[in-house]
Structures are given as C-alpha cells and as structure tokens.
C-alpha cells in the first residue's frame, strides 16, 4: 500500500470510493443496468405520484402511503446513484468527509423510513380486510398524516447516532472505502479505535427497529389470513387476498435482499468482495425500481388510470 494511503487521517478531508473493487475494468458495463434501474425508479415513482394526484378516486390511505413510498425511493436512489455513476463514468472517486457522512445518513434513515412505510401499509391492509366498515373512520386523513410523520421522525432520529459517532472516531489507517457509496459499517471499519459502540448500535437498529417492523407485518398478515379464510366463498377469498398481493411483493423485494446481505456479512467470509458490493448495491436499487412496476401491474386502479392516460394522449 502506498504511503498516501497510510498517513494520519484523524480528520480526513475526503474519502476515496473504489466503486466495485476488482471489477474496475467493467465499470462502464456495470453502469448500464445501474443507470437503467435508476431511470426506471425515477420515471416509475414520478408516474405513481402523478397518477395518485390526478385521480380523486385514489385519494385514500393506501395510496397516500404509496406516495410516501415513492418519495422515499426517489430520495434513496438520488442519494446514491449520481455519485455511483460519476465513479463508473468519470472515475470521480473523491467524496468530502462531511458529504460522506451526509450520504450515510440519508441512505440509512430512508431505509428505516421505507421499512416504517411498509408497516403502515400492512396496517392499512389489516384495517381494510379485518374491519372494512370502519376503515374510513379509523384511517382518517389526519391519522394517516400522523402515521406518516411518526415514520419519518423515527427514521430520522434513530439514524442520527450513525454520522455523529462516525465523526468522532480518529481515522489513521486509510481513507479508501471499498464501495461506491458511504455505508455505515464501511466507514466505521476505517477507524483506528474501538468502534464497538457503533457496531452495537447498528445491531440495535437492525434487530430492534427493522426486526420489530418485520414482526408487526407478520402479525398483521396472520390476522389478515385468518380473516380471509373465514370468508365463505373461494372467489371472495381470492379477491380479498388479491388486494394484498402488491404489498406482499414489495415486502419481499425489500426485506429478503436485506436478510441475504446480513447473512453474507456474517457467514460469507469466503465470498468475493465484489459480489458483496454488487449485492449491497442491488439492495438499494432494486426496490425503488420494482415498487412502481409492482403497483402499476398489480393494482387495477393505477393500471386503469395509466392506460386511460396513454389512450387519451394517443387519441
């Protein structure tokens, strides 16, 4: 390692993002699917927001939460992809220390917000199926706004210690981050002091925040399935369950890659570093790109409004 990488970085002015370590020669090719997913995420989520805004029949709790999900996905992708593409296309690897901590905060806080929104959507499906006659009385616009505010505040507050602690550690090993963005654990691993506080807090967030979200969603669907199976006719059961399909697909697209990454970090020590990094990148990119497609294909109201939009324009 060169001397420039081993000098004292107690107060580093910049970090160096490597992109995909070991695959630098393929960065241009890797950027093609990444850029495509970014374009799909931007276009798809803006279309969702536009359709919900323009269609009065979609002004309800489910679609308000869907708009929150779309905004969250837009922020999440925009906080990572532009810098990522700059690395792939222009070899622009430097990132200011404060900008790195800001990016870290946005990535992790909006992941927490997205998890909270999925919980809110599970609550909406539970009330709609288990208490259909009281749905509009329980989930009023005011209650939906309060739930949305609580989800955003939780995500913003619970992640605040990440950049705060990271800014306190001395960095004297290297300023090279073997990723195309500033992930929490990647930055903390560069510190040359005991960072157990950051590690333990990261585990707390993983298990006690997102873990509780998963439990809440699971309990909601147990109650939902119990209510569905109590419906006498098969067609009515299938129709009712169909209202949950989009949400279930979005849940799987968000939590399964996250679980896979957690397991790989702990048990996949023999897995190549570039595979770790690629999977972590897909975890940030795939849900924002897939969510509008899932809801566009599986939700009849959105699909119908989209078809009418293009048919009208075509006419």
Image (tube, grey):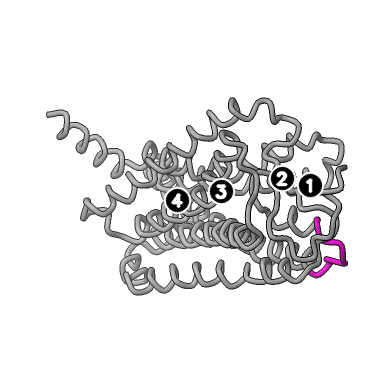
The range drawn in magenta is 190-197
Residue nearest the observer in this picture, 129 or 2: 2
Q: Nearer the viewer, mark 2 or mark 3?
A: 3
Residue 261 is tagged as 2
Q: Which residue is mark 1?
A: 265
**Which mark identifies residue 74?**
4
Quadrant in the picture for residue 238: top left
**Would you call the spot at circle 4 few (<14 residues within 10 Å), some (14-19), or many (20 or more)?**
many
- Mark 2 in CB contact with mark 1 (< 8 angstroms): yes
- How much space separates mark 2 and mark 1, taking CA atoms? 6 Å
Of mark 4 and mark 1, the one earlier in the sequence is 4
- Badge 4 marks a residue whose secondary structure is helix
CA distance for labels 3 and 4: 10 Å
Alpha-carbon span between mark 2 and mark 4: 22 Å
N-term-proximal mark, 2 vs 3: 3
- From the image, which quarter does the N terminus lie in? top right
Q: Residue furthest front?
A: 3
Location of residue 173 with respect to 313 vertically, above or below: below
In the picture, measured across the screen, residue 140 lies left or right of residue 310, that is right
**Helix, strand or loop status at disc 1:** helix
The residue depicted at 74 percent of the width and 39 percent of the height is 276
Is residue 228 rendered to the left or right of residue 157? left
Q: Evaluate if marks 3 and 4 touch, with contact meaning CB atoms under 8 Å apart.
A: no
State the image quarter where residue 128 is shown: bottom left
Kindly indicate whether the residue at mark 4 contacts the one at mark 2 (C-beta within 8 angstroms).
no
Image depth: mark 1 or mark 3 in front: 3
Q: In terms of secondary structure, where does tag 3 sit? A: loop
The C terminus lies in quadrant: top left
The image position of residue 76, as x and y in percent, is: 52, 52
Q: Is residue 43 above or below residue 32?
A: below
- In the picture, the disc for residue 134 is none
């Amino acid at each position: 390692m060169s001397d420039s990488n081993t000098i004292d970085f107690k107060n580093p002015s910049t970090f160096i993002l490597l992109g995909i370590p070991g695959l630098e020669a393929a960065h241009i090719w890797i950027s093609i699917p990444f850029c495509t997913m970014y374009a799909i995420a931007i276009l798809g989520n803006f279309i969702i927001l536009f359709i919900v805004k323009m269609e009065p029949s979609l002004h309800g709790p489910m679609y308000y939460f869907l708009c929150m999900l779309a905004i969250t996905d837009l922020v999440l992708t925009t906080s990572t992809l532009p810098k990522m593409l700059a690395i792939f296309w222009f070899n622009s690897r430097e990132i200011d220390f404060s900008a790195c901590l800001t990016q870290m905060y946005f990535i992790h806080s909006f992941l927490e917000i997205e998890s909270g929104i999925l919980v809110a959507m599970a609550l909406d499906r539970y009330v709609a199926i288990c208490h259909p006659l009281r749905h509009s009385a329980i989930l009023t616009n005011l209650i939906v706004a309060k739930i949305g505010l609580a989800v955003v505040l939780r995500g913003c507050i619970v992640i605040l210690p990440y950049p705060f602690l990271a800014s306190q550690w001395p960095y004297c090993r290297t300023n090279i981050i073997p990723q195309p963005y500033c992930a929490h654990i990647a930055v903390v691993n560069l510190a040359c002091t005991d960072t157990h506080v950051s590690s333990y807090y990261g585990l707390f967030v993983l298990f006690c925040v997102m873990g509780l979200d998963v439990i809440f969603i699971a309990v909601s669907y147990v109650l939902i399935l119990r209510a569905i199976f109590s419906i006498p006719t098969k067609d009515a059961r299938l129709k009712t369950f169909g209202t949950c399909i989009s949400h279930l697909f979005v849940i799987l697209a968000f939590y399964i890659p996250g679980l896979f990454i957690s397991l790989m970090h702990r048990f996949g020590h023999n897995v190549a570093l570039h595979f770790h990094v690629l999977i972590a990148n897909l975890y940030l990119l795939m849900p924002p790109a897939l969510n509008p497609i899932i809801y566009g294909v599986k939700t009849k109201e959105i699909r119908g409004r989209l078809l009418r939009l293009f048919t009208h324009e075509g006419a």
